[in-house]
Image: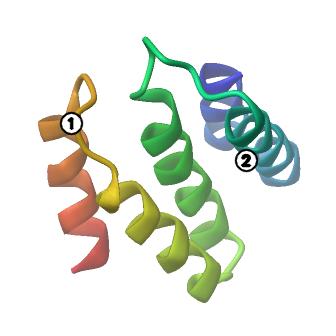
């Protein structure tokens, strides 16, 4: 779902992308993926990008900060650079 949402965002289908990402985050909250811990921070980053495009800046910042607080997952360094840039 994360990849599909990223594709929808790229196509400008923001409401659909946001819906998929919010659904994914709810599912992860109910039953976290033990081996794929990278999914949640990347989903939060992607949702923040959608929210910025919709001018929902406060919620976007909340998602970015939640993604930045995560640690110990694959590709962490890669995402941390993007998060630092986005948070300014």
- Residues at marks 2 and 1, CA–CA distance in whole angstroms: 27 Å
Which residue is tagged 2? 12
Residue 85 percent location from the top left of the image: 20, 66
Which residue is tagged 1? 76
Q: Residues within 10 Å of mark 2 (few under 14, many from 20)?
A: few
In which image quadrant can residue 71 be found?
A: top left
Name the image quarter holding the N terminus: top right
Q: Is residue 8 above or below residue 83?
A: above
Query: At x 61% / y 53%, what residue is drawn?
Result: 47
Residue 38 percent location from the top left of the image: 39, 28
Q: Is residue 74 left or right of residue 64?
A: left
Residue 55 percent location from the top left of the image: 66, 82
- 2 or 1: mark nearer the eye: 1
Q: Outermost residue toward the top?
A: 35
Residue 57 percent location from the top left of the image: 58, 84
Check disc 1 and report its element: helix, strand or loop.
helix
Q: Is residue 36 above or below residue 27?
A: above
Query: At x 63% / y 79%, what residue is drawn?
Result: 59
Name the image quarter holding the C terminus: bottom left
Query: At x 22% / y 34%, what residue is drawn?
Result: 72
Counting residues from the N terminus, which is met first, the one under dot 2 or under dot 1? 2
Check disc 2 and report its element: helix, strand or loop.
loop
Query: At x 31% / y 60%, what residue is drawn?
Result: 68
Q: Is residue 53 above or below residue 42?
A: below
Q: How is the image coloured?
A: rainbow
Number of marks in the image? 2
């Amino acid at each position: 779902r994360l990849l599909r949402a990223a594709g929808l965002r790229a196509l400008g289908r923001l409401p659909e992308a946001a819906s998929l990402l919010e659904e994914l985050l709810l599912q992860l909250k109910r039953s976290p993926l033990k081996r794929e811990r990278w999914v949640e921070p990347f989903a939060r980053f992607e949702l923040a990008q959608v929210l910025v495009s919709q001018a929902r800046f406060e919620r976007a910042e909340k998602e970015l900060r939640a993604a930045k607080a995560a640690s110990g997952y694959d590709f962490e360094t890669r995402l941390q650079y993007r998060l630092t840039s986005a948070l300014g």
